Amino acid sequence: MGPGISGRIAHTKDLALAMLRLNPSTLSIAFGQQLLDGAAHLKPTFETTLLPLISKRLLDPTLQRSNSGSIGLGSALSLFLASQKRAPKLIAEVGTYIGNSAAAMGCGAGLNGQAVQLITCDMHPCTQQPFAGLQLPEGSKAQVVQGSSTQMFEFLASKGAKLDMLHLDGRLMKDDLKLLSQLLKADTLIALDDCEGDEKGHMNLDLLRRAGLIQNHAYVEPFPRELFRRWGLETRSVTGFLLPQSSISFTRQ
């Protein structure tokens, strides 16, 4: 019997004996609850700093284009809290648009008191200053690449960069996958926008899986609407996460 067949049999047996099964939906509830409850003290910062900035950009007609949309409130809050928890020093993003997702990650990461470096790309970015209006730690910088994801990843790879966080709000290209194998670490936090139906979030998830780039990550669905009510918000998120398995632990409390 080949190792592949025996491995599948063992895996099936393990599932049959499992008393607790975790899936992307149950992980979403657990992760979202811990983020929202554990960061309740950050609610004033979100409401007085990030929320007005996001709203202002959404209402600015000079930043909009007809064939795209910015992230919603739930996704912005998800990115804000996840980046605060992960405390990334280097963030890469595919899909700048008006800079709201970049601002959410920069604002969250900056709360840890260390400089935040973010590089984001878009073929037609609507802003060159996604950190504008934010008070971030000294040395923080956002760089907007007007070009493809492949061009941005090639630049990062040439610098020997290793990403702490990656946000995908654009479709990955075939050439991106080889470059990402050089840029991703075992503990890179990956956020996927538009994780619903046949949207690009699920397409990117499938590409990353097929390329063998997320074997040490667990997929977490977008946080359900009821979790945001803990902060008094009637909103939803379409942002899923790929959590490094090293960031998941079992505790007594």
Image (cartoon, rainbow, N blue to C red):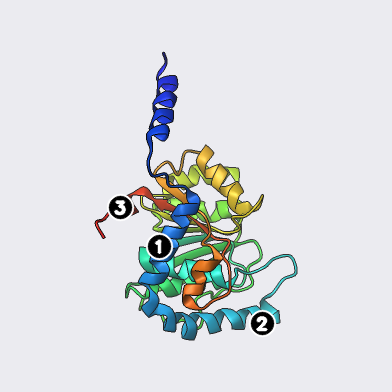
- Residue 249: assigned label: 3
Above or below residue 210? Residue 239 is below
Extreme residue toward the top, this view: 1
Extreme residue toward the bottom, this view: 48
Q: Amino acid at mark 2?
A: Leu
Q: Nearer the viewer, mark 2 or mark 3?
A: 3
The reply to whether residue 50 is in sight is yes
Above or below residue 2? Residue 29 is below
* Residue at (41, 59) in percent of width and height: 30
State the image coordinates of residue 227 (x, y, percent, origin top left).
49, 67
Q: Secondary structure at mark 3?
A: loop
Q: Badge 1: few (under 14), some or many (20 or more) residues near its Cα, within 10 Å?
A: some
Do residues under tags 2 and 3 come within 8 Å of each other at their CB atoms?
Answer: no
Q: Secondary structure at mark 2?
A: helix
Do residues under tags 1 and 3 come within 8 Å of each other at their CB atoms?
Answer: no
Q: Amino acid at mark 3?
A: Ser
The reply to whether residue 172 is in sight is no
Quarter of the image where the C terminus is located: bottom left
State the image coordinates of residue 111 (x, y, percent, origin top left).
36, 76
Residue that carries the numbered disc 1 in the rendered image: 90
State the image coordinates of residue 16 (x, y, percent, origin top left).
42, 32
Q: Nearer the viewer, mark 1 or mark 3?
A: 3
Labels 1 and 2: the sequence-earlier one:
2
State how far apart marks 2 and 3 are (Cα).
42 Å
Residue that carries the numbered disc 2 in the rendered image: 59
Using residue 92 as the reference point, say whether residue 64 is left or right of it.
Answer: right
Number of marks drawn: 3
State how far apart marks 1 and 3 are (Cα).
24 Å
Using residue 214 as the reference point, say whether residue 98 is left or right of it.
Answer: right
State how far apart marks 1 and 2 are (Cα).
29 Å
Labels 1 and 3: the sequence-earlier one:
1
Q: Nearer the viewer, residue 214 or 9?
A: 9
